[in-house]
Amino acid sequence: MNIFADFTQRVKKVVEELELKDASGVSPDLARVVVEAPRDPDHGDFATNAAMVLAKPMGMKPRDLAERLVEGLKGDPDITEATIAGPGFINLRVKPAVWQRVLGGILEQGQQFGAVVPQSPAKVNVEYVSANPTGPMHVGHIRGAVVGDALANLLTFAGSDVVKEYYINDAGSQIETLARSAFLRYREALGEDIGEIPAGYYPGDYLKPVGAILKDQYGDKLKDMPEVEWLPIVKDAAMAAMLDLIRSDLSALGVEHEIFFSERTLHERNGGNGSKIDHMLDGLREKGLIYQGTLPPPKGQVPEDWEDREQTLFRASDFGDDTDRALKKSDGSYTYFAADVAYFQDKFERGFQETIYVLGADHSGYAKRLQAVGKAVSGGKTDVIVRFCQLVKLMRDGEPVKMSKRSGDFITLREVVDEVGPDPVRFMMLYRKNDAPLDFDFKKVTEQSKDNPVFYVQYAHARCCSVLRQAVEELPDPVVNDVVLAQTDFALLGDVGELELIAKMAEWPKVVNAAADTHEPHRIAFYLHELASSFHGHWNRGKEMPHLRFIDAGNSKLTLARLALVRAISLVLASGLSILGVNAPEEMR
């Protein structure tokens, strides 16, 4: 029940009834016509830009077209007033019955109010986190994990068929370094003095359990093997342990991926059919999209896979990239980018119509190349969306937080979650746009005050639940459930604060659609804070004016109508918090 979409269609119908034509006899394109909430509620319930966006193509003055539209809109049985503002904006006021229908719809649909259920949902892949599996998750991974997870939840709520995916970078040299680091811990577990961890190795204590496991399984047998024999054994053991650690860390944050995709599988040869990278190269070669050539050195820092020799190159610049990209080095080995292309092709062959990458800010140069890959491999059939997450700075009372001893040189995700809980972490990571820097202060996010956004929103939900519990205790007839509330006379809700709360909830489906279309889950967090603020504000009015309080034991009908309003607010808050992956508590102590 999207009231804004409903009234947008009504405005478009009035435009169509005017039978407008441009100089060539063509009817206007109505795609830009929208109905929105006015910035100032005193101007009306809705505002439309129809005259402003259609007048010029139709060779008319906006105000002249607005006057014709106003006449048509006055015939709508739900519109009580249509007026022109400024150069041609149209403000609308509607009957109370419109808001009553919205409130009834929320109670009927529950937490599914605002959700979209399409007949044929789009298949969407959201890949996020994808950190190198060489240790525990650290603070730099938190934001991408939360943004990716909330975005996947949002798109699911908005009607897409979403798969949450983690790409395991298990084919690079860092995995051999991990294995050698774990082998040191294995020797340490056998009682050797391994001394200082060599430069370039992973120094954290988190590899000590891996050494202990290897000791328990193999005793001292690995120590006497040549490296070529023990390396794959230790590599597999270390990888398995690190993935278990990563899953555990992400689970503590409420993040669960459905697929963990191994980069190594892209390199493995399938009998005489070659690898998935070989398959990718064959496909691009057939399309004439790869060639043998050399690339000029890039400006700035030269990447390690650049060569001043002839290589196998992908015509990425034909698809919007800044330069062509190397797929195969002069020695016949593949570049990192070759695996990226093969990985996208695998996603395309799995039938995804949209692939989303949530990356750290240090990968900002990847957007154009990934989008070029999408256009080339899918022939434009799969949209590629890239979202970058800026760094998070951890603070305590305004001072930077020191590094962790357990990890070696960084603060772990688990340490942050264990100290403040997953709810403050998730909400605050989404309470700012993903590409803006973020300061996360441990003290502020645990304060029980209106200055702490996550507390403020959760407290609004808990306060709603408290009102409903109190009603059961105080009313002579304690039957208060969604069925009873849905049958209440909503016409009794006439206070301006009550109507503003309904109008705010009416925005929810529109907010969901806009957040999903722009791939911006922070819009959900912003909206929830606005709704919570409106609710707390109305609550405070009731403290000053007793006739506005939600429970009036002497007027059961009015009380039930107000309880219906409170219940609807709790449903919308719970729905939004669920998208963010944050709990909606019924009590807060």
Image (spheres, helix red, strand yellow):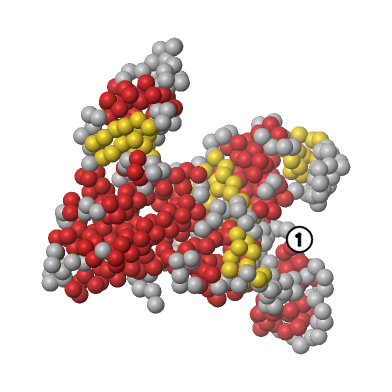
Residue for point 13% across, 70% down: 477
Asked whether 271 or 177 is in front, the reply is: 177
Viewer can see residue 161: no
Q: Is residue 74 left or right of residue 522?
A: left
564 is higher (above) or lower (below) than 91: below
Asked whether 416 or 103 is in front, the reply is: 103
**x and y, in percent, of residue 187 in the image:** 77, 81
Asked whether 265 or 586 is in front, the reply is: 586
Which residue reaches farthest bottom?
191
**x and y, in percent, of residue 135 in the image:** 67, 69
Which residue bears the numbered disc 1?
A: 173
Task: Say which element carries label 1.
Answer: helix
**x and y, in percent, of residue 266 in the image:** 65, 52
Q: Amino acid at mark 1?
A: Ser
Residue for point 52% across, 69% down: 445
Image quadrant where residue 371 sits: top right
Asked whether 172 or 25 is in front, the reply is: 25
Residue for point 66% across, 31% down: 287
Q: Is residue 535 left or right of residue 477?
A: right
Image quadrant where residue 59 sits: top left
The quadrant of the rendering that contains the C terminus is bottom left
